[in-house]
Amino acid sequence: MDKKCTACGSCGFPMSKLEDYALKNPESLYCVHCTNPDGTLKPYAEIFEMTVSYYKNSQGIEDSAARKLVQDLLTSFPAWKKMKEKENAPR
Ligand SMILES: [Zn+2]
């Protein structure tokens, strides 16, 4: 496997070109779609909606099904895994 092909730590987008990385920095953990122009990670809700519409448009998945799928998908990535663990953590 080529070391250059990294998946985004937020949405799983495969980053193969320099343009795919946040700030075109190959050291970046996140892709250009998940980050603001200054390179910081966008809020979960924004990335969630973006990914939901991606699945709806590209795969023709129903809204409710797409939301369920994307929630499971995003919370399996490093950027949101901790968030999920926090939510499920006993108080
Ligand atoms: Zn991403």
Image: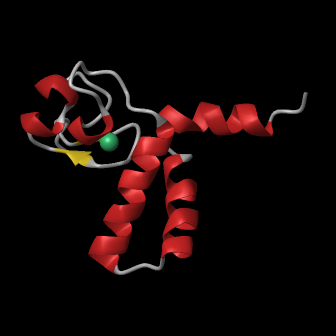
Judged from this view, the residue extending furthest toward the left is 18
Question: Which one is in front, 15 or 55?
Answer: 55
Judged from this view, the residue extending furthest toward the top is 38
Judged from this view, the residue extending furthest toward the right is 91
Residue 57, image x, y percentages: 30, 73
Q: Which residue is drawn at 21% across and 29% down?
A: 22
Q: Residue at x 16, y 24 (%)?
A: 23
Left or right side of 33 for 78: right
Question: Which one is in front, 80 or 64?
Answer: 64
| In the image, residue 9 above or below residue 73 | above
Left or right side of 18 for 58: right
Residue 17 at least partly seen: yes
Left or right side of 67 for 9: left
Residue 63, image x, y percentages: 49, 73
| In the image, residue 45 above or below residue 78 | below
Residue 83, image x, y percentages: 63, 33
Question: Which one is in front, 64 or 82?
Answer: 64
| In the image, residue 73 above or below residue 45 | below
Residue 61, image x, y percentages: 42, 78
Q: Residue at x 29, y 49 (%)?
A: 13
- Image quadrant holding the C terminus, namely top right
**Quadrant assignment for ligand 1:** top left
